[in-house]
Image (cartoon, rainbow, N blue to C red):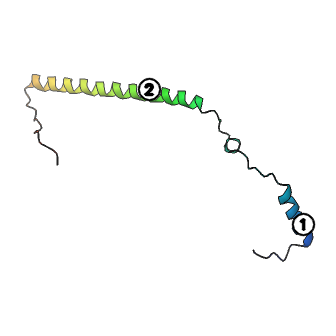
Amino acid sequence: MTAFPQFSNTDIDNILAYTAAAPATPPTPAAVTGVDANPSNDGASNTLILGALALLFALLAGALVLVNKTLRRFADEKGVELNQASKRTPI
């Protein structure tokens, strides 16, 4: 242990008395962080957010399908030939 020559015997006695009187249990993490300890509310909001994101993804996928169909129809009307991707097995 590191020596502290600047401490007197009274200082050391005060430190020992303080550590003996200190609470033995540390505070709970919820009290320290201020987070609600009830996780049941978080589940509902997470489900709502995930549902909204899934709906948004479905709408975007549908919009992309419609844009693809519209562009193919315009290409057919203008007589533009579309390059068909070759069917090959990936490595």
Say whether residue 11 is left or right of residue 31: right
Which of the 4 image quarters holds residue 89? top left
Q: Residue at x 29, y 24 (%)?
A: 62
Mark 1 lies on a secondary structure that is: helix
Q: Nearer the viewer, mark 1 or mark 2?
A: 1
Q: Residue furthest right?
A: 10
Mark 2 lies on a secondary structure that is: helix
Say whether residue 60 is left or right of residue 5: left
Residue 48: x %, y % from top left: 49, 26
Which of the 4 image quarters holds residue 79? top left
Q: Which residue is mark 2?
A: 51
Residue 35: x %, y % from top left: 65, 38
Q: Of marks 1 and 2, which one's residue comes earlier in the chain?
A: 1
Question: How would you rate the neighbour count of disc 2 (Cα within 10 Å): few for under 14, some for 14-19, many for 20 or more?
Answer: few
Residue 76: x %, y % from top left: 10, 24
Q: Amino acid at mark 1?
A: Asp
Q: Residue at x 67, y 45 (%)?
A: 29
Say whether residue 91 is left or right of residue 24: left
